[in-house]
Image (cartoon, rainbow, N blue to C red):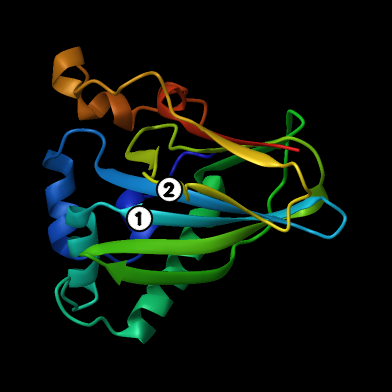
């Protein structure tokens, strides 16, 4: 996963209001929280073809993003504005590899360009959805991780039984969610500053320890 070439706040949600850009430097790491769900899509031959992400952003970040669109979290949101923002997000996330690591039978899979981006708002929170097709569909045990190596964004699995769903999977396939055993400490408690995180590169492994994993065994 390459290191962001610009502030991750802009990578994730396109052009954000100046208020967010001004506020985030003062916040402790991480700056954004995202709860994830995933749908695994299989073909008739039993090969995994794509993963459909659903990312729900924390209320504060969602509010900033909607303000940037001239919208309110408590009222109706312009569908055209949300659709445009979803497309921008999907395009921007490509340079980060969509923060997605997918393996089948232990081998990393190459993913294609995101398709079908969409965005909705419910209970004051934005949810971004997009599909990542495998360049070469493959059968076998799949392992999906979504994380930010620099831990600017804290990804976690959403609550509920629908955190991982299967579409068209062969009979007997089962998805299991694995949550990290490590809980992120507050930077103040560890003596880590924002400079510590800003110095991270694409080879950083700090965020890996907080990665969630979904395993689909067939």
Q: Which residue is mark 1?
A: 56
Element assignment for label 2: strand
Q: Bin the neighbour count of mark 1 within 10 Å (Cα to Cα): few under 14, some 14-19, many 20 and up.
A: many
State the image coordinates of residue 148 (x, y, percent, origin top left): 43, 37
Q: Quadrant of the C terminus?
A: top right
Give the label on residue 195, or none. Answer: none
Q: Quadrant of residue 19?
A: bottom left
Check contact, mark 1 vs mark 2: CB within 8 A. yes
Q: Can see residue 73?
A: yes
Q: Residue at x 33, y 57 (%)?
A: 10
Front in this rendered view, residue 22 or 84: 84
Residue 180 vs residue 131: left or right?
left
Front in this rendered view, residue 214 or 200: 214
Element assignment for label 1: strand
Q: Residue at x 19, y 66 (%)?
A: 17
Classify 76 as above or below 55.
Answer: below
State the image coordinates of residue 195 (x, y, percent, origin top left): 24, 27
Give the label on residue 36, or none. Answer: 2
Disc 1/disc 2 C-alpha distance (Å): 6 Å
State the image coordinates of residue 194 (x, y, percent, origin top left): 22, 29
Indicate which disc, 1 or 2, sits on the residue closer to the N terminus. 2
Q: Quadrant of residue 207?
A: top left
Classify 79 as above or below 217.
Answer: below
Q: Residue furthest right?
A: 45
């Amino acid at each position: 996963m390459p290191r962001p070439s610009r502030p991750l706040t802009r990578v994730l949600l396109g052009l954000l209001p100046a208020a967010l850009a001004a506020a985030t430097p003062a916040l402790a790491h991480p700056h954004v929280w995202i709860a994830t769900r995933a749908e695994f899509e299989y073909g008739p031959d039993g090969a995994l073809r794509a993963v459909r992400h659903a990312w729900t952003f924390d209320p504060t970040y969602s509010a900033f993003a909607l303000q940037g669109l001239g919208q309110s979290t408590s009222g109706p949101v312009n569908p055209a504005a949300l659709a445009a923002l979803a497309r921008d997000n999907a395009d921007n996330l490509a340079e980060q590899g969509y923060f997605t690591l997918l393996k089948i039978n232990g081998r990393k899979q190459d993913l294609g360009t995101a398709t079908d981006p969409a965005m909705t708002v419910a209970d004051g929170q934005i949810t971004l959805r997009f599909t990542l097709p495998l360049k070469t569909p493959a059968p076998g045990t799949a392992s999906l991780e979504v994380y930010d190596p620099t831990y600017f964004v804290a990804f976690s699995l959403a609550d509920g039984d629908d955190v991982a769903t299967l579409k068209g999977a062969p009979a007997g396939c089962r998805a299991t969610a694995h949550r990290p055993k490590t809980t992120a400490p507050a930077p103040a408690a560890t003596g880590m500053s924002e400079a510590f995180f800003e110095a991270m590169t694409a080879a950083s492994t700090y965020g890996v320890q907080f990665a969630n994993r979904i395993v689909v065994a067939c």
